[in-house]
Image (cartoon, grey):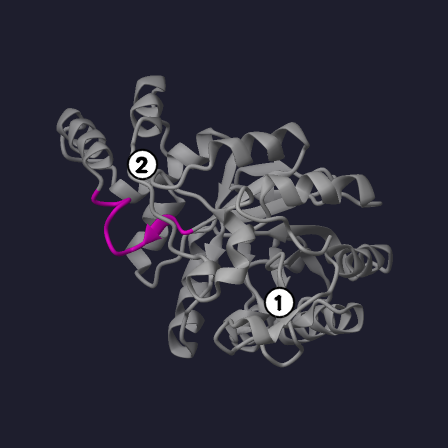
């Protein structure tokens, strides 16, 4: 059975549930990607930053489970490659390492940039660069023209940045990938993106596996209530509930796990009632795991647009 999909503004379809590959070690990612393809995943979320695209490419190149035209492969241009020539090279390197011929989706990983070669260093004011976002974006538009990329988008972009960016785009972003889960719902950002036909992809849709989302009392109460009614057979999990909440509000999810059983659980779609959706929407806990301002106060504008203006669009 073909996976559930969302149609992007570019006209291409993106599977609603994908596999996150951040922070996956070589041996682990080899097994996980293989198991995910067998379980039905067709959407693999990658990035130059993750340092494992070559390993993923070996799997994709050798596997005979899924033809290329049934896969949806995403990569991202990291913050030290925002200059147009470096953004182009990042794309070409990803295509080569992933052995895919083209990318289904290429994202600008962060709105801020750092100097070339400084991407793995601790963020400090000294390494920040001043490459206008639109310089990078126009290069991505050229990559679409050349057939190297089917769709382009952004990641970690707030409403204020998008408001300034969209009028300047020849090809508007098809996707904004951001941290989203019941403890960081970002309702305003999701609504803005949907109102402007920008699909939203949630990274960390289960938090960081350290509690909070999966141990939230509301999530656990819904799970317990459902499993008591279910007679013990098709038990739902906290992860399934959290993922269903995002999917039912029109958000694509890319959970990450190294556990084969959880791979299958995460891929199994459940449907929440309107009452359950309202319960989750009422969660008050707010936690953001990924925030560059924790390292460098100069980057408060990335997630706190009221504190400062984005310096370069």
185 is higher (above) or lower (below) than 275: below
Q: Is residue 50 visible?
A: yes
**Dot 1 alpha-carbon crowd within 10 angstroms: few under 14, some 14 to 19, many 20 or more:** many
Between 120 and 280, the one lying in front of the other is: 120
Q: Position of residue 25 (x, y in %)?
A: 40, 75
Against 217, residue 113 (above or below) is below
Left or right of residue 89, residue 189 in this image: left
Which residue is farthest top? 275
Q: In the displayed structure, would residue 55 be above or below residue 40?
A: below
Query: In terms of sequence position, does the residue under pointer 1 or pointer 2 come before the other?
Result: 1
Foreground pick, 305 / 37: 305
Residue, disc 1: 79
Q: Residue furthest bottom?
A: 117
| Residue in front for this viewpoint, 240 or 61 | 240
- Disc sitting over residue 241 in the figure: 2
- Residue 79 in the image, given as x and y percentages of width and height: 62, 67
Which residue corresponds to the image point at 36% horizontal and 18% vertical from the top-left? 274
The secondary structure that dominates the magenta segment is: loop
Say what secondary structure mark 1 lies in.
helix
Image-quadrant location for residue 148: bottom right
Residue occupying image coordinates x 30% and y 61%: 259
Magenta span of residues: 204-215
Mark 2, other Cα within 10 Å: few <14 / some 14–19 / many ≥20: many
Instruction: Identify the residue at image location x=22%, y=40%.
Output: 216
Q: Is residue 210 magenta?
A: yes
| Quadrant of residue 163 within the rendered picture | top right
Q: CA distance from mark 1 to mark 2?
A: 33 Å
């Amino acid at each position: 059975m073909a996976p559930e999909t969302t149609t992007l503004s570019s006209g291409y379809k993106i599977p609603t549930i994908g596999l996150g590959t951040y922070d996956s070690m070589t041996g682990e990612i080899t097994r996980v990607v293989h198991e995910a393809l067998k379980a039905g995943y067709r959407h693999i979320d990658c990035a130059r930053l993750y340092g494992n695209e070559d390993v993923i490419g070996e799997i994709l190149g050798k596997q005979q489970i899924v033809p290329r035209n049934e896969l949806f492969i995403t990569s991202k241009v990291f913050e030290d490659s925002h200059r147009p020539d470096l953004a182009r090279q990042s794309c070409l390197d990803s295509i080569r390492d992933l052995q895919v011929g083209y990318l289904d989706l290429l994202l600008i990983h962060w709105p801020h940039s750092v100097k070339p070669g400084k991407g793995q260093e601790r963020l400090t004011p000294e390494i920040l660069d001043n490459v206008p976002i639109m310089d990078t974006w126009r290069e991505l538009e050229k990559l679409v023209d050349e057939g190297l990329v089917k769709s382009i988008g952004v990641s970690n972009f707030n409403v204020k940045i998008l408001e300034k960016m969209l009028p300047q785009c020849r090809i508007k972003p098809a996707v904004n990938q951001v941290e989203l889960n019941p403890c960081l719902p970002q309702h305003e950002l999701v609504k803005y993106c949907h109102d402007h036909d920008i699909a939203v992809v949630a990274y960390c849709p289960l938090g960081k596996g350290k509690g909070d989302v999966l141990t939230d009392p509301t999530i656990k109460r819904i799970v317990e209530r459902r499993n008591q009614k279910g007679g013990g057979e098709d038990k739902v999990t906290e992860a399934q509930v959290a993922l269903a909440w995002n999917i039912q509000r029109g958000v694509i999810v890319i959970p990450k796990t190294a556990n084969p059983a959880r791979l299958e659980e995460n891929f199994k779609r459940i449907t929440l009632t309107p009452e359950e959706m309202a319960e989750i929407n009422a969660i008050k806990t707010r936690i953001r795991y990924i925030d560059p301002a924790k390292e460098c106060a100069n980057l408060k504008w990335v997630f706190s647009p009221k504190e400062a203006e984005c310096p370069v669009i």
